[in-house]
Image (tube, rainbow, N blue to C red):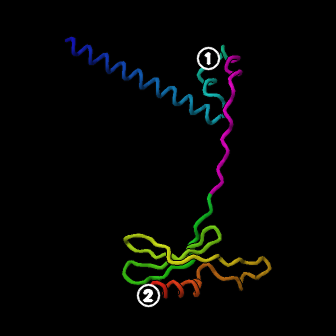
């Protein structure tokens, strides 16, 4: 009988601790979204003057979104191997892609498109840059 009471006490105590942790985590999450001090959410309304004296947390600064990787061209080499030309940060990368991994074959600066140049004369993103693919194929062979 004593063992049953000890187990019951342990379960009740564990439930109380988990409930308290859940309560505190929700309160702290609310304070973080508002940019206020975590203590201000836990202090009762009567003691609000004390919470106002606590320094507030600085608001979160949004991170700049990273540049996107653009796949310029793809060429199958046979089986499950491919040669991919991808552009990131103004640099074109020729990548050899196989089941075992990806390796960089060549790099080159991306061509700069002038604003004055009409769109019809600008190289299309769907057409493979022949000079890069040819050089990469020669280096692989």
Q: Report the span colored magenta.
A: 48-65
Reading the image, the residue beneath label 2 is 141
Q: For the view shown, which residue lies furthest in the right direction?
A: 116
Q: Is residue 17 magenta?
A: no
Q: Tell me which label, 2 or 1, sits earlier in the chain.
A: 1
Report the residue at 39% width, 84% height from top. Answer: 78
- In the image, residue 15 sits, relative to residue 103, either above or below, namely above
Marks 2, 1: nearer the viewer: 2
Give residue 109's position: percent from left, percent from top: 64, 76
Q: Please tell me whether mark 1 sits on a helix, a strand or a loop.
A: loop
Label 2 close to label 1 by CB (< 8 Å): no
Measured in 3D between alpha carbons, the distance from the residue under mark 2 to the one under mark 1, in whole angstroms, is 74 Å
- In the image, residue 55 sits, relative to residue 109, either above or below, namely above
User: How many numbered dots are placed on residues in this image?
Assistant: 2
- In the image, residue 58 sits, relative to residue 14, either above or below, namely below
User: Label 1 crowding class (10 Å Cα cut-off): few <14, some 14-19, many 20+?
Assistant: few
Q: Is residue 52 magenta?
A: yes
Give residue 122's position: percent from left, percent from top: 70, 82
Give residue 35's position: percent from left, percent from top: 66, 34
Q: Is residue 80 left or right of residue 25?
A: left
Magenta: main secondary structure: loop
Reading the image, the residue beneath label 1 is 44
Q: Please tell me whether mark 2 sits on a helix, a strand or a loop.
A: loop
């Amino acid at each position: 009988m004593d063992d049953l009471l000890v187990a019951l006490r342990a379960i009740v105590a564990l439930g109380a601790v988990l409930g308290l942790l859940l309560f505190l985590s929700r309160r702290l999450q609310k304070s973080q979204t508002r940019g206020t001090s975590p203590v201000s959410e836990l202090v009762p309304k009567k003691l609000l003057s004390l919470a106002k004296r606590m320094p507030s947390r600085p608001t979160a600064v949004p991170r700049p979104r990273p540049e996107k990787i653009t796949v310029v061209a793809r060429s199958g080499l046979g089986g499950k191997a491919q040669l991919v030309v991808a552009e990131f940060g103004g640099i074109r990368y020729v990548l050899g892609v196989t089941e075992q991994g990806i390796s960089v074959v060549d790099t080159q600066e991306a061509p700069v498109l002038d604003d004055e140049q009409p769109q019809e004369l600008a190289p299309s993103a769907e057409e493979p840059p022949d000079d890069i693919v040819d050089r990469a194929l020669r280096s692989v062979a």
